[in-house]
Amino acid sequence: MSSKDRILSRIRRAASGPDPEVPRDYLRVHAVRTPAERVDLLAAHLTDYRATVHRTDGDGLPELLARLLSRHESVLVPPGLPPYWLSAAGPARIHDRADSTPAALDRVGSVVTGCALAVAETGTIVLDGGPDQGRRRITLIPDHHVCVVRVPGQVVDSVPQALERLDPTRPLTWISGPSATSDIELDRVEGVHGPRVLDVVLLDAQ
Amino acid sequence: MTGTDLGMPAFPPFPEAAREAVHDEVLRANLRHATHTIRDKRARAVAELDDWDRLRAAGKAIKDHTLRHLDRYLLQLEAAVTAAGGTVHWAVDADEANRIVTGLVLATGEREVVKVKSMATQETGLNEALEAAGIAAYETDLAELIVQLGHDRPSHILVPAIHRNRGEIRDLFRSEMGRWGRPAPEDLGDDPRELAEAARLHLREKFLRAKVAVSGANFMVAETGTMVVLESEGNGRMCLTLPETLISVVGIEKVVPTFRDLEVFLQTLPRSSTAERMNPYTTMWTGTGTGTGTGEGDGPTAFHLVLLDNGRTDTLADEVGRQALRCIRCSACLNVCPVYERAGGHAYGSVYPGPIGAVLSPQLRGTANPIDATLPYASTLCGACYEVCPVAIDIPEILVHLRERVVQGGPVTREGVRVRIRPAHGHTAERAAMRAARLLLDRPGALRAGERLLSRARRLRPQRLPGPGRAWTDTRALPDVPAESFRDWWARERKAPQK
Ligand code: SF4
């Protein structure tokens, strides 16, 4: 008997008893909010977890990004990032090519992306590898990540609403603040392996 | 066939280990600080959700339903992972899982793997197996790194290095890092910030060149084949994204039916665990991205999923004990446990410490050895663990059931075979367990705290325990059960004539 068959037959002998109906009476959202309130909550929760939140509209975006990137010499750019976003930015644009090694990407200081959506109740942004986000590694290796969220359209209230809108077959990265550890005497330290600085730009796209 | 291996086989029974730990002041101070800090934060994070009880009930039901049809969901998972370009392996026990992983690593030609914290591979003792095959396994969680550099054992599910303070960690980094890769700076101080930076630099070198990674997973979605890993530091993302080959070793009980089911656990796990609305990073991936979706070209080109039984199907066969398989490893029960706080994680002698360890380890391994016979006694039955558990595992109920098993013997399933174990009363281990537990718990303050929690836990408990536990409750009216402190229980059991 293969191990697979052995395990399955053990399960069939062991599993017994009632089969509960899953109660789905928990809340889809935890409050009724206007779009503006939803965006405000997202901003508050992102700030709570030490992301830096900025607000702008389409006209102000290139200036803002130029300022956020000014400390860096180079920036990773996903293939489908709208070109005007970086139209005022100084750093050299680096593209993630198939033959770019992780070590090469490690020399890039920053990355700018869009996102798939953001979750207000948890202060989370979700990336799904879309054209304005690129492969997962480009938002992981650089020490600085600037993520642009189009508000209010990309903001959902809750985790249940987020899952409804996401495609599970895409690689998904949920980000809630910069990486952190509390492993040493429970003191929270921001930034271990992921980007240590997370700037979130709420782009008014009404 | 050898018994199920949960790691640390040559460990002293709970009472002796606990007595040692109680006298280790550093450990106790660290543990007290840690458990109280997390406990209070968790209560606030949970209070934010008005529907906590409903989420808890849903989480419990999703897990129970899945366990009831585990064969079907595992087959569905296998089909989905395979369709997405992954390969699924099945491992009956720890040895088989280790053999599979070792073989997969050797086949890549690599002799080095990076690892992201995985309780399943600690359970199987994978690192030792890899080492024996000439493969170096690098733990990449900060806490696991501290544990590994110190040739130590983890003491907490969530903060495995909770027993080490900053000065000890600095000394360890200074003396050990250089032996494994990039050394720590000469003048390294003991500020957690500096220590984290040293770990970042030390590990980055490994991430950037790693070709093979080994992980666990928090959830596996049967309908889509999607794997889910929650983490804080980003080492998980590094391991899951950069290497060419990814091997995930996951207990069979980690499957959930649908992607939608995650909406429950992604709300309850972070809040129960790190007391956050959401943990910093969660990664979800499906196979290698080939065959479905558009993940192709993003992340590892080879993905292997090793499904681990290692005593889980035996646990499933026990009507009372099987609820331990609902556990999502949040560690909330550790942080409220008066015994854990005093004894520390090492005393439990397995990778699963605290209340959940006291019910899971003896079941996965069997209650035949001394430590497992004593573990069910590592509790005051105060019920705090049940109250905080996000999947409503009635740990006191299982403890009572397992004690009954130790004292009276009875039917159990071992390696798929139904056997009877003999009563162990009068067993030296049992007597020692009670002595040590009394030493730990004869503190009125601790018991009073436990009893306060009780009155709330009691509401949620049935008048009679179902299943084999009934024999126990039949003779003892249940409202008194949790209120019967360990002291009383012990005093009475000790006086009871040997059957
Ligand atoms: S038993 Fe419950 S509280 Fe304890 S770790 Fe498991 S899920 Fe968390």
Image (tube, rainbow, N blue to C red):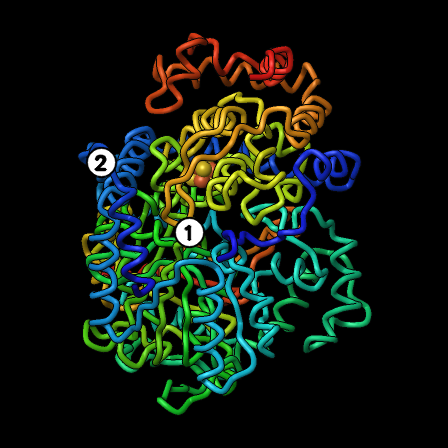
Q: Mark 1 = which residue?
A: A46
Q: In the rendered structure, the residue with mark 1 lies on which chain?
A: A
Q: In the rendered structure, the residue with mark 2 lies on which chain?
A: A
Looking at the rendered structure, the kind of residue marked 1 is Leu
- Percent position (x, y) of residue B357? 53, 40
| Quarter-of-image position of residue B38 | top right
Q: Disc 1 or 2, which lies upstream in sequence? A: 2
Seen at 32% across and 47% down, the residue is: A120
* Residue at mark 1 shares a chain with residue at mark 2: yes
Name the side, left or right, on which B323 lies relative to A181.
Answer: left
Near mark 2 (Cα within 10 A), the count class, few <14, some 14-19 or many ≥20, is few
Name the one closer to the observer, B92 or A130: B92
Seen at 47% across and 47% down, the residue is: A48
- Percent position (x, y) of residue A85? 31, 75
Name the side, left or right, on which B85 lies relative to B338.
Answer: left
Seen at 74% across and 52% down, the residue is: B166
Seen at 58% across and 15% down, the residue is: B489
Question: What element does badge 2 sit on?
Answer: loop
- Percent position (x, y) of residue B409? 48, 29
Q: Is mark 1 within 8 Å of ligand 1?
A: no
